[in-house]
Amino acid sequence: MSVFHSTMSRRSFMKTLGLAGVGAAALTAPVFHDLDEMTASGDMANPKKPWWIKERDLENPTVEIDWTLVKRFDSTKSTQSNNALYDPNWAQALIDQKAAKKKWITENQPGYTLKDFAFRNNVGLPIGALNPWVLTGTQIPADTPASLGVPKYTGTPEENARMLRTALRTFGAYQIGYVPQTANTNKLAYSNGVIIEDTQTAYINAASKNVMPSGGLTHIPIMYPEMLTAYYAAPSPLIRGIHEQGNRGNGQVRSSGQRFLVAIGYQGVNGSIGPMPPFMALGGESEQGRIGGQSISPTYGMTQTQNLLSTDLPLAPTHPIDAGIWKFCWTCANCSKVCPSSSNSTEHEPTWDPPATLNVRSLTDPNIIYSIPGKKVFWNNMATCKTYQDMVWGCNICMGNCVFSHLETAAVHLAVKATLGTTPVFNTFFKDMDQVMGYGLQQFSAGVGPPTGTFNPKGVDWWKTETPPHGEDGRSRELHAQ
Ligand code: SF4
Ligand code: SF4
C-alpha cells in the first residue's frame, strides 16, 4: 500500500491527529482519497472563517450598495488628491502646516521631533523600486512556461486558490480575498486611473496608461497590517511612516505575487484600480465601517494597508462577511468623539444621500462630488478631515481609537467579537465599556489636538519600546487571523 495515497475519511484523519470526538457532524463526509485531494478541497481552498463570522452572497457586503447608481470616479476629484476643490481654508492650511512643522520640531513636541519626521519620510520602498502594472522586457522572470518550453500550470479554481494563498501568505500577505471581475466591480475602477478595453491581456499603452480587460480577471485585495502600538502615538508624522511601512510590505507581496503568477503562465496585474475599502468588503476581509476611507477587519481593525493584485488564474471566490462590525458602528461612534476636526458623522442611521449640511460638492462645480454614489453609509466631512490630517502631518486618531483597533487583551477581545457577530443587543454596553476602560485616544476631542497645544506623550514612549521586526505586533497569531 502506498504511503502517500490512501483512502482516509475525515473521521479517521482526525482520529489520527487525536481530534476525534469533536462533533459527529464535523467528522462525516467528505472522504478524501489522498492528501493532494484534501489540500485541494473547498474547505482548504479558502479557509473557513470562525463560526461567528457569517458569509454573505457575492457582491452583497453588509453596507447596502445600489449597483445601478455606482459610477466610475475620477480620483483627481477626491479630497485626498485635490482638497482645494472642497475646503476654502485649504490654501491657508498649507501655509500653517509648514510653520507648525518648524515650530514643533524646534519645541521638541511629543511625536513631532526631527526623528519622527525622519522616520516618516524614509521608511518606504527604496528610491527607484518598481511595482509595475504589468511586467515587460527584463522584468519578466527568466523561467516561464514559454521560456522553458513546458505547459503552463493548471489546476481547479479551488486548487489554485489554495496554492496562491500559500504563496502570497508566505510572501507576507496577512489577508487575501478573491473577487471576481464583473460589470459591477468594473464600476469601482477609477475613470482616470485605468482604461477598460475589450482585450484579453492587461498592458501599458503608448500613452503610458494602464489598460485592463473588461472581464476574465480575479481581483485579489491584499492586506498588510500597520503597527497598532504606533497608532496609539497618534497624531504624529510617525503614523504616516507606519502607513508607508505597510505600503512597503504590501508592495513586496504584490511584486513577488506578480512574478510568481507570470512564472506559472498567467497574468499578474499589479496595483489598485479603485478605492480599496469596497474591494476588501467584497473579498470578505473586512466590513465597511463608519469611517469611509478605511474598512475594518475582525482581526486587524482599521490599521491596515490595502492594495490589489489581479490575475486570469481561475480562482474560487471568497465571499463578503458579516462579523457584526457594520451594525456595531451604528451604535458606537466612538471615533467621532475623538476627532479634533469634528469630521466624522455622529448619526446612528446610515443614509443613501449625504445630509444637506455636509457639502460634498466642489466649490467651483456642483456636478463634482468627492465620493462615489450608490451606497448607504455614514457621510463624513472628508474635506475638513484632509485639511486636519495634513495640518498635523498625520492624524488617524479615529483609526487608532476604533473599538476594533485593539489587541485581544482590550475590550473587544475574542469572546466579545463572537458576541458582536451573533447579536447586536450588547453593542451599546461594549462601546461604553471601551470608553470606561480608557482604551484608545480619548484625550482628543473636538478642537483638542496639536494646533491647540495637546500632544500625545506616547509619541515619546514609542521610541523607547523594543518594536517587533516589521512592526508585526502579534495579531497574525490570533486564533481567527486570516
Ligand atoms: S483622521 Fe483625524 S481629522 Fe480625520 S476623521 Fe480621523 S480623527 Fe478626524
Ligand atoms: S470607533 Fe466605533 S463607530 Fe467608529 S469605526 Fe470603530 S467601531 Fe465603528
Image (cartoon, helix red, strand yellow):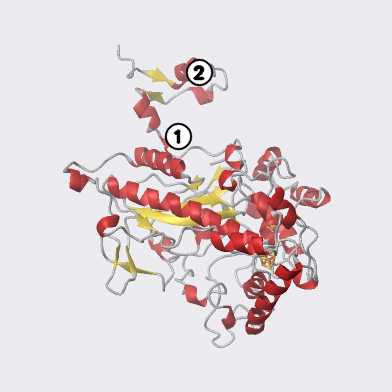
Q: Of circles 1 and 2, which is in front? A: 2
Position of residue 365 relative to residue 111, above or below, is below
Q: Quadrant of residue 80?
A: bottom right
Q: Are marks 1 and 2 in contact (CB under 8 Å)?
A: no
Q: Could you tell me the amino acid type at mark 2?
A: Leu
Q: Toward the viewer: 46 or 113? A: 113
Q: Residue at x 60, y 59 (%)?
A: 119
Label 2 sits on residue: 17
Q: Residue at x 25, y 48 (%)?
A: 142
Return the x and y of residue 280 as percentages of the image width and height.
51, 54
Return the x and y of residue 457 as percentages of the image width and height.
77, 57
Q: Residue at x 48, y 76 (%)?
A: 76
Q: Residues within 10 Å of mark 1 (few under 14, many from 20)?
A: few
Return the x and y of residue 340 as percentages of the image width and height.
75, 68
Return the x and y of residue 303 as percentages of the image width and height.
61, 54
- Residue 423 shows up from this direction: yes
Q: Residues within 10 Å of mark 2 (few under 14, many from 20)?
A: few
Residue farthest along the right direction in this orientation: 436
Say which mark, if any, is on residue 43: 1
Lower position in the chain sequence, tag 1 or tag 2: 2
Q: Quadrant of residue 474?
A: top right
